Image (tube, rainbow, N blue to C red):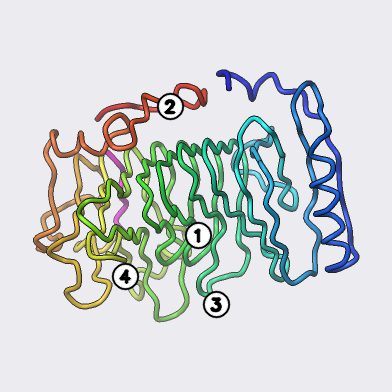
């Protein structure tokens, strides 16, 4: 796929809309699978609209997501653009009009999209976007929810200039992933709860996985700020024993607890995890009172360099073809 392909696409659209419940939903899926063969400007493109009020739909189709709107605007009822150029499987789950997008495959790209799970904090785990696609890149997208917003399931992933918000473990999974230039925003949780940004689940020292947050802004909503006396907020906690997360050259505001990081269950993983910070700024970036676990590190340049785009996700080999910007070093 050549660089600049987003700018010169001429979209031909087919709307498939139904309000006939499950039967209508299945009719839509069948029509989608039939109409994928239509070619528009030598590309196979379909746009369809989710229906409301059904219990669950599972559909697998090749997709590329892109909407020509400001990245912080709301996308209309979860439109999806389907293209043969990127072969990705999409699982669309509708539960009480809550849209969950789950992507698998290779080469998934999303640009200027909004993914939102509207379940609210009282529904507990509510994923807005799950990606287990290798060489996946997401640019200028909004990903919002509460608990478990973004499931970075596996493989190599890259996020640039995105707005990501949630309450508990809202960036979680076991991908090798780099976030650059993103706003990472903690929201007000339920009474009695705290907030945790990351829950990385590396389970073996041999896995090349982890979360790298570089040149990002770690922020809180106004509502959370007004309740800092009752809510503790952390950068991450270890979902598995070899959990790996680093924060580099980022702005960390002072809603983050001085200890910075939280346990998952007692002492589990505290000696084997790798949590690191490098050259961060902001009132929440002071490492003087951080946790004293064996696995916590105030990193030097060489250590930080291992978590860059070029070293951690071999981004120089594949990100140029996306036309998305990236920084390859610290």
User: Which residue lies under the disc numbered 1?
Assistant: 149
Q: Residues within 10 Å of mark 4 (few under 14, many from 20)?
A: some
Residue nearer the viewer, 200 or 33: 33
Query: Which portion, as a residue range, is magenta?
Result: 249-255
Which mark sits nearer the N-terminus, 4 or 3?
3
Q: Which label belongs to residue 232? A: 4
Where residue 295 sits, quadrant-wise, is: bottom left
Residue at the disc numbered 2: 318
Quote the CA–CA distance across marks 4 and 2: 39 Å
Label 1 vs label 3, nearer the camera: 1
Residue 23 pos. (x, y %):
87, 66
Residue 229, above or below 134: below
- Neighbourhood count class around disc 2 (C-alpha, 10 Å): few under 14, some 14–19, many 20 upward: few
Image height check: is 78 above or below 260?
above
Please report whichever mark, 1 or 2, sits nearer to the chain's N-terminal start.
Answer: 1
Kindly identify which residue carries mark 3.
Answer: 122
Query: Upstream in the sequence, badge 3 or badge 2?
Result: 3
Say whether residue 327 is left or right of residue 58. left
**Left or right of 129: which side holds 297?**
left
**Label 3 packing within 10 angstroms: few (<14), some (14-19), many (20+):** few
Q: For marks 1 and 3, give the CA distance.
A: 14 Å
């Amino acid at each position: 796929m050549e660089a600049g392909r987003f700018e010169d696409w001429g979209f031909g659209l087919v709307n498939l809309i139904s309000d006939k419940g499950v039967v209508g939903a299945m009719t839509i899926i069948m029509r989608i699978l039939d109409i994928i063969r239509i070619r528009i400007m030598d590309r196979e493109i379909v746009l369809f609209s989710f229906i409301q009020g059904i219990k669950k739909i599972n559909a697998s189709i090749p997709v590329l997501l892109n909407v020509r709107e400001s990245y912080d605007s709301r996308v209309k009822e979860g439109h999806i653009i389907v293209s043969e150029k990127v072969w990705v499987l999409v699982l669309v789950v509708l539960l009480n009009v809550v849209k969950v997008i789950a992507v698998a495959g290779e080469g998934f790209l999303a640009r200027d999209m909004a993914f939102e799970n509207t379940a609210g904090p009282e529904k507990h785990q509510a994923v807005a976007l799950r990606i287990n696609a290798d060489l996946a890149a997401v640019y200028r997208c909004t990903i919002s929810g509460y608990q478990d917003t973004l499931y970075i399931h596996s493989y190599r992933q890259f996020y640039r200039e995105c707005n990501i918000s949630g309450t508990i473990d809202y960036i979680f999974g076991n991908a090798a992933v780099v976030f650059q230039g993103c706003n990472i925003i903690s929201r007000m949780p339920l009474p009695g709860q705290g907030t945790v940004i990351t829950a990385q689940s590396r389970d073996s020292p041999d896995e090349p996985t982890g979360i790298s947050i570089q040149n990002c802004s770690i922020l809180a909503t106004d509502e959370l700020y007004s309740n800092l006396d009752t809510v503790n907020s952390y950068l991450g906690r270890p979902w598995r024993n070899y959990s790996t997360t680093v924060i580099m050259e980022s702005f960390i505001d002072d809603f983050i607890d001085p200890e910075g990081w939280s346990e998952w269950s007692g002492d589990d993983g505290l000696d084997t995890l790798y949590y690191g910070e490098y050259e961060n700024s902001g009132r929440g970036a002071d490492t003087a009172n951080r946790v004293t676990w064996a696995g916590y590190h105030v990193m030097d340049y060489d250590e930080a360099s291992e978590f860059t785009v070029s070293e951690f996700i071999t981004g120089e080999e594949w990100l140029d073809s996306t036309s998305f910007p990236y920084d390859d070093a610290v």
